[in-house]
Structures are given as structure tokens and as C-alpha cells.
Image: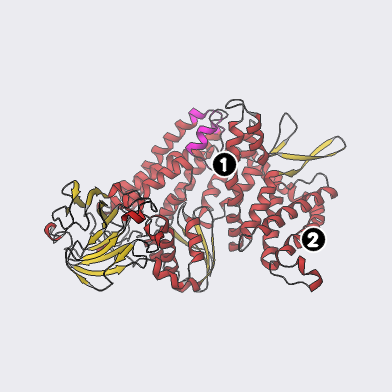
Amino acid sequence: MLAFFQKIGKSLMLPIAVLPAAGLLLRLGQPDLLNIKFIADAGNSVFASMYLTTGDNAVAVFSNLALIFAIGVAIGFAKDNNGAAALAGAVGYLVLTYGCHAINPDVNMGVLGGIIAGILAGVLYNKYNDIKLPEWLAFFGGRRFVPIVTAASSFVIGFIFGYVWPYVQNLINSLAHWITDAGALGVAVYGFLNRLLIPLGLHHIINTLVWFDFGSYKAADGTVYHGDITRFLHGDPTGGTFTAGFFPIMMFGLPAACIAMILTAKTARRKAVYGLLLGAALTSFITGITEPIEFSFMFLSPLLYVVHALLTASSMAVTYWLGIHDSFTFSASLIDYLLNFGIATKPILLLVVGLIYGVIYFVVFYFLIKWLDLKTPGREDEAEGAEVAYRGEAGGDRSAAQAAHFLRALGGKTNVSEIDNCATRLRLTVKDMARVDEEALKRHGARGVVRTGKNTLQVIVGTSVEFVADAMKQLDDRDIEKHAQPPSAPAGDAKDEASPSFDPAAFVAPINGTLLALEAVPDEVFSKKMMGDGFAIDPSDGVVVSPVDGTVKTVFTTKHAIGIEANDGSEILLHFGIDTVNLKGEGFTVYVEAGQQVRRGDKLAEIDLAAIKDKVPSVITPVVFTNLPGGARVVLKKSGRVQQGEAGIINIE
């Protein structure tokens, strides 16, 4: 049952993703901004309602937003996200809604009607998408049968709901009235539940009810709108009470918590934690996506997460008491704050509240982490530097590399029976949970792992999750070794003498060109040192030689990278250009193989720069030390031009 509800939560993300675009058009077209009716109406088409007239009453029976949910949820539930499910969802919603209304004109299923129709269509698609019919009906078999059976099922459900739904509608209205009438307590309870349900992935369900179904507002033109967000965007003075309180948390509170966790991290690990949390803090502030932060501490320190949920509840109550009204189309972020500044109530005061909550979050997190010795990122009990950073491939192949590592940690592709995702997390069904290596998942980029059932789990990845999920679906067990680099040894296991024994004279430039700092590489996997510290060379010719005496450990099948273990224990990766993996070996000639002994100056490879330079983003070649001890860094000893075989160009300190 939990897995089923989680699937509903995941499916809601597709229609919700439509709302920022519609909200942007709706706001830009308003009189206080561009004052262009065409733009406003284009955005309003998502939120608008249409009517059937019975006597003197106009009844809202067809919501475009509900139709979008019917289509989006159907796609999300369909096992292969096929468009036939989307068509079935739309058909099912129309039959269900008009059928109910024919029996009882007072029935208004709203967004819930769309969700029910979408679930029905998705389930029926999974059951009947490959059905075989008799020869004389064969044309209507397979996927063509799905809209037909969905319409028939919706007809039956619509007949039943015509009599039953008024009771459900009254229950929902009673719940909505209780939350609304409870004032600050009501919005605080909603805020608390919203955060507590995130670990289970069920917060989207309660959000959908509050944002798009609770309450009603009749505009001057007679149009009726439902839900806190929809009512706010259409001028309801009571709208925006259930969403304003999220702005202080997402824009200020959680970013401040990140700063507290960075400053309380162990000194040797602070740099790695800084890289992890600073990006998450900016993401929360600018876009309102908070899960990368929350999953970084919710399992390491559940107490902090409960405190976070309580602070969210308090923020909701405070903004309610202060009479602040503001809302969003996707999340409470800087983007939506600026977009809705002109129609928000007391937006400057909201900013002040946000700054206060930033201070509160910092003080509370810093004090609790220090006082209770909470195991937030960088403070875990394992040895200093024991966490292994994800060493994914660069550029376009990074998702494939991370997907391969994940599949390996999940026990192989054959152990994974279902792969799905929502905004920031993989939702997986595995055959044998005992084969899942959670630590390996975390070493290769997972922010957290949640076991939600005997055979179901979620892997929190971040906003790149969709690309990782797609790559996981495409890979099989034979591809894993090709795409996944050998796992990094824990930094704590790296040879302690690697840094002090490094001899600058024993390391030479592998290629002619211009010496660059690693931060100058136009790929964040390298520039942010996710794979380790090092440097780069913008090559002037394509001959590559070994920079050290050692052993060739890895020669990639696409010939675009070579890994070497030096005799002093240093592991060095030479990556020829950016996104060159996509060339599949074109333009590269490799003269060594794995296991071969090499000496400084031995020819490793040759690159046809003229042939590849217009096919890839850059030919800059990173040279990365992948197993440096914690705190060690690569220091450039010169700048500008460097000659192949030149010594003394770097040192490790």
C-alpha cells in the first residue's frame, strides 16, 4: 500500500512540473506587469474552469488543471510512460466528470477527479496494453484497447460516484474548513505534515489537496477557483496562507542550516562537505528544491529533521499571524518571490521573517550539532576522509557512469525489477534487498537511501535524477563494467605516504600545451574536483606520454582516458578532452594496455586534435590525482606554456 501511494506521489510530479510555465505566463500578462491579456489567458488556460449551465446556476465541472493531472498521472502510472495511457487518462476524466455531473449537478471532483482518472488509466494500461483480441476485433487490441476499457470503467465509476461522491466531497470540505477555521494551528499542522511526509515521498499527495483543491473563490467574471495556489494567483485575498510560510524556510532557513553543517564538519572533511552543501543551499534559495539538503541530515540525525519540521510549522503560523499572503507555481524560491512580489501581501515583511529564520536555523543547527555531537555530513564516526566521493565520468557520460555504479550497488540490473523517479529520487523495486549495498550507493552520489518496503527503496540523487534513471533503464549487466570506473579506494585507505613521498622531479608534463588550474576545466565534474584534485593542459599537439613511472591500471574502451598507478602509490587519471567519450574512440590511438609497466616519457596515446576539436566542447585535458589523502592539494609551480616531459610543474602539499 505504501508503494502504491508513493507511486501516486511520484506521478503527481509530471503535472506539477507544468505549473511554473503556466504561472509565469499568467503573472507576466497581468496589469501590474506586462498587461497583455493574450499572455495572461494563455497561462490561465491551465488553471481555468469551464461551466455547464443548469437553470440559473453555473457549475464548475471541467477544470483544465484536473485534466492535466489526469493525463500526467496516467503517464506516471504507465509502466513505460506511453502516450496511450495519457489519452486514456483524458478520456477517463471526461467520462467520469460528465457522468457524475449528469446524475448530480452539485458534484465537483476537482483535481481529485483527475488523479482518480489518471490512476485508473495507468493501471488499466499496465494490464491491457498488450491484450490480444479476436481477429475481427484485432484493430482494437493492444494499446488501442486501453482508452476503450478506461472509458467503460469510468462510466461505471462515474455512475457510482454520482451518488457516493457528495459524501466524499462533504468530508473534504469539512477537512478544508477545519484547517482553514483552525487559523494558525491549521497551517502549522499542514506545514509539519508536509515535512514529515517527505521521507516517504507522500508529501505531494497532501500538497495537491491543499494547493489545488481546498477552498473556493469566485472571481468577478464568475469563474470559480479551488486550492490555495490557484486562488492566490487569481486574486483571492485569502489565498496564499498555506504557502507563504515556506518562503522563510526554503530561501533562508535551510541554506543557513547548510552553513551550520559546514562549519561544524570535521576540519579535514570540511572542504568536501562545503562542495556538497553549498550547491544544495543555492538550489534551495533559487529554485526551492530542498530535498538534497534534507536528505543529507534526516537519516544521520532524525532529531534535527523533527526540529526542521517544527520550525517549518512555526514559520507557517508566524506568516499567518502577520497576515502575509504569498504563493508559488512550483516552490517557495527567489524566482517565485520576485515573480509574485506585486500581488503578495506584505512581501517585504516576509523577507524580514526569512532573515530571522535564517538566523534561527543557523543557531539551532549549530548548537544542537555541537552539543549533542550529531552525525551530520562531515561528522560521521568513520575515519577522517573515509567517505568516497562519486567519481563519475565527465560531461554527457556522467549520468551513465553514476547509473552503472548504482546498478552495481543494487546487485546488478537483474536484481532491479522496476526503475522510476520523481523530482529528486529514484524509486526502485528490487528482487533481493540483501544484495543492496547502501554504503556504495552513498559513495557514488546518493544523498540518502530509504527502504520503503520489503522490496522497495528510494535513492535520493538530486535534480539530475531523471538522467540517471534513464541511463539505468538503458544499461544492462554487460554495460556496467564499461561505464563504471573502478570504485575509488576510501581516502582513509590511501597510502599515507603519497603526499610526503611525492617527488616533483619524478612527475613530468604528459603533453605540450598551456598549463591550467583544474578550476578552469569547462566541466564541473573536474572543476569542482569531484574526482580529485589536479591540473589541466590545453594541448598544442596530440602526443601523450606517461607523467610517472608506474603501471597502467585502466584503458577506457572509448580510448578517451587512461588511469595510471605511480610507483609512489598515486593514482592518476588522464582524461583527453571533455565529452570525448561520445566519440567512441574516434580520433584516438592508444599504445598501452591495462597492466603494462610504463616509465616517464613513454608514449601512451595520440590524439588527432584537428579531427576532434570541432566535435567536442573542449580538448582541454585534465590530469587528476584520484586518491589524495584528506587535506592534500595539488599546487601549480608555474603557469603558461609547458613542454612535454618537463618536470617540477606541480607539487602536492
| Residue count near mark 1 (Cα–Cα under 10 Å), binned few <14, some 14–19, many ≥20 | some
Residue sitting farthest toward the right: 55
Boundaries of the magenta span? 321-349
Say whether residue 609 is left or right of residue 171: left
- Expressed as whole percent of the image width and height from the top left, the position of residue 132 reads 73, 72
Say whether residue 417 is left or right of residue 541: right
Residue occupied by mark 2 = 152
Say whether residue 386 is left or right of residue 330: left
Residue toward you, 420 or 648: 648
- Expressed as whole percent of the image width and height from the top left, the position of residue 1 reads 61, 64
- Say what secondary structure mark 2 lies in: helix
Q: If you read the primary sequence from the N terminus, does the residue marked by circle 1 or circle 2 appear first?
A: 1
Give me the residue at 66% from left, 50% from top: 69
Q: Which residue type carries mark 1? A: Pro
Q: Can residue 446 be seen by looking at this rendering?
A: no
- Expressed as whole percent of the image width and height from the top left, the position of residue 27 reads 59, 33
Residue occupied by mark 1 = 20
Residue toward you, 534 or 159: 534
- Expressed as whole percent of the image width and height from the top left, the position of residue 237 reads 63, 30
